Image: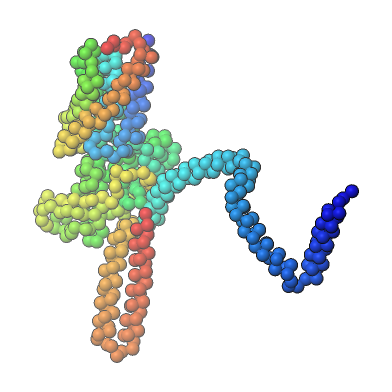
Amino acid sequence: MLSRRTRIALAVLVVASLTFVILDLRGGEGPLSSARSAVSAVTGLLQRGAATVFSPVTSAGDWWSTWRNQAGQIAELRAENRELERAVRESASDRARADALDELLRVATAGRYRVLPAEVIAVGPAQDYAWTVTIDAGSLDGIEREMTVINGQGLVGRVLKVNQTTSTVVLLVDASAAVGGRVATTEEIGIVAGTGRQDSLDFQLLDPLAELVIGDSLVTFGSRGGRPYAPGVPIGEVVDITGTAGQLTRVATVRPFVDVSQLSIVGVVVRPPREDPRDSVLPPREEQQGQDEQQGQDEQAGDEANNDDANDDVNNEDANNDDDANNDDANVDDGASTEENTP
Amino acid sequence: MIVRQGLVIGIPLLLASIIQVTLLSRLGLPGATPDLLVVTVVAVALAMGPVQGAFAGFLAGAIIDVSPPSDTVVGVNSIVYLAIGFVAGYVVDNRDRTVFGMIVIVGLSCAAASLGTAIVDSILGSPRVLWDSVPLITLSSALYGALLAPVVVPLMEWLTKKLAPEVLLEG
């Protein structure tokens, strides 16, 4: 049987336990609650320290259970990454193509040309000195000989030979090419001829006395029936004039709008416009300059109105209207310039 | 046997012409377009001999002249390349052939090709030849040819050894 000491010790412990129970059940502040909070503060600290020490071990269990999942996830993400990289690469070239098509569409719409888009697929070697390219559209697509070829910048050339699915285009800069050109501002006509160099064309005015200044833009005069050259297609800009007015050999150097070393998307004019689009197809840069000039004149007019008839209400209103119009113009200009900067 | 030799010569030339107009001429390199076709012609001449070289030159010229986007007089390139193929096969002694010699002969052939076509074209009255850019075109063509030679010449030799060993010149 239990010894006497043991029985006493048990009885004391039981009583102590019961005392704790009773004290705790009674609630409220007491010696027990303060002892409890003191002890729990210490054990809490110990628990936190232990948790920090053991955390790698406990999380290892977690890591282990998801190991297979992660391997799968990595493979999945890698595949996704490859896919995205490919999409990014392609989107750059897609965007370039879309921009080229947009430009072409703008020109075709402005000039009311019905165009068939095509892509340059081959270029003749430079040592042939011939500027000819192959495009991926042929007689099956409705291409015929002597059709005009344009792109978003202006005149590219004309169709020389047609196969079933491809055609050969001779570019405007080829030494054998010549097109009737018209000066956009003065309506003077002349002949633009290729030189074989990609950045210059020769322009000879039919009227040797006609006025011509550097910076003038040229558009096509238009052939009979729109072939080989449709009317109104931008050709280039006069950058140099040799000879003086009246001289028979007065030749202007024209920088073509089209960069032949960067040709990709072109449009074949399958039906020329019913009416000559005149200068409406010229690049926006030129239009913008025109607007700027007009705007300047408007401002001057407005200023004059203000100075002369400062007290006259009617004139003041006019001046205000002018200002409004100017603001509108400015907004349009901003839009155009941002569009230009975007690509 | 003749047919097989013709194919061993013709198919590489066809591939070379396609690569030349769709890729090399679109790279926009300064000066000439790398003349892969002439390099291939010379490679044939070095691997098989002057007659096969001349045939390859004729074929190469015909291919480039009739296939789009060419607008030159058909036959000009044939004459020039034929001469180059024959001469390249004739002057090179196979017993003392070196890599350097091979590069030099290909470079010279490319220069001769661009110069030769320019001369024949202007004799025939072509308005296109720009004489002031002929030197640049000729030199750059020689340079590009010399760069292509170490790839194309061994490849052609290997093809000949595999497919038409009876005509391979022993080096």
Query: As rendered, which of A305 and A109 lies closer to the eye?
Result: A305
Q: How many marks?
A: 0
Asked if one can make out residue A126 in the rendered structure from this viewpoint, the answer is: yes
- Residue A160 in the image: state x and y as whole percent: 32, 38
The answer to whether B92 appears left or right of A322 in the picture is left
- Residue A168 in the image: state x and y as whole percent: 34, 37
Quadrant in which the C terminus of chain A is drawn? bottom left
Query: As rendered, which of A152 and B89 lies closer to the eye?
Result: B89
Image height of A34 relative to A256, above or below: below
Query: As rendered, which of A33 and B50 lies closer to the eye?
Result: A33
Q: As drawn, which residue projects farthest toward the bottom?
A: A311
Residue drawn at 44 percent across, 40 percent down? A141
Q: As drawn, which residue projects farthest toward the top?
A: B166
Q: As drawn, which residue projects farthest toward the right?
A: A1
The answer to whether B15 appears left or right of A125 in the picture is right
- Way the structure is coloured: rainbow
The answer to whether A238 appears left or right of A273 in the picture is left
Residue drawn at 26 percent across, 78 percent down? A301
Asked if one can make out residue A273 in the rendered structure from this viewpoint, the answer is: no
Query: As rendered, which of A293 and B66 lies closer to the eye?
Result: A293
Where, by quadrant of the figure, is residue B162 drawn? top left
